[in-house]
Amino acid sequence: MSPRYLDNVDEQEKRSELFALLRGAPESALHVNATLAEIPENLHDGLVEYIMTGRPTGHFLEAVISNDLLQACHRADIRSRVALYAIVYFLFNYGPGACYGSPTHYRTWLERGGLRGKEDDDGSNRLPA
């Protein structure tokens, strides 16, 4: 079962147009897509900050991102449990492939500093190889 917004072509077109408008503000675009994917609002900041800056998430999102279904189900509150499919759908469709899928991917993404990368001492961003 896909999220409701995919059932309506007009909504899909609106989402694409909105994403195009927000291209210069990726955090806003990720928040919009998280909303459209029906992810609980209390998880938006954690997902977006993790993707953009490599900020550590809570234990539930870490388990989801690390592909640990048992721990994800164990750590989820009721809203997160119901939204588990939507969260995985969001990561697969909007998250960089290198940021999810295993505990190693999760740790490496944190070390990398997300999409923005970590700043060097001179204030420049240099992404690790």
Image (cartoon, rainbow, N blue to C red):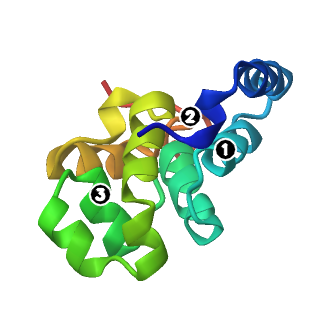
The residue at which mark 3 appears reads as: 64
The residue at which mark 1 appears reads as: 36
Answer yes or no: is residue 57 visible.
no
Mark 1 secondary-structure assignment: helix
Disc number lying in front (2 or 3) = 3
Mark 3 secondary-structure assignment: helix
| Front position in the image: 2 or 95 | 2
Residue 125: which disc?
Answer: 2
Count neighbours of disc 1 (C-alpha within 10 A) and say few if under 14, some if 14 to 19, many if 20 or more.
Answer: some
Q: Amino acid at mark 3?
A: Val
Say which quadrant the C terminus sits in. Answer: top left
Horizontal side of residue 94 vs 89, given as left or right: right
Tell me whether circle 2 and circle 3 mark residues in contact (CB < 8 Å).
Answer: no
Of the two numbered discs 1 and 2 on the same chain, state the one appearing first in sequence. 1
Answer yes or no: is residue 117 visible.
yes
| Front position in the image: 87 or 106 | 87
Q: Is residue 121 above or below residue 115?
A: below
Q: Is residue 42 above or below residue 55?
A: below
What residue lies at 34% left-to-right and 28% top-to-bottom? 97
Q: Position of residue 22 (x, y in %)?
A: 81, 29
Per the model, the C-alpha gap separating discs 3 and 1 is 19 Å
* Residue furthest right in the image: 21
Q: Quadrant of residue 123?
A: top right
Of the two numbered discs 3 and 1 on the same chain, state the one appearing first in sequence. 1
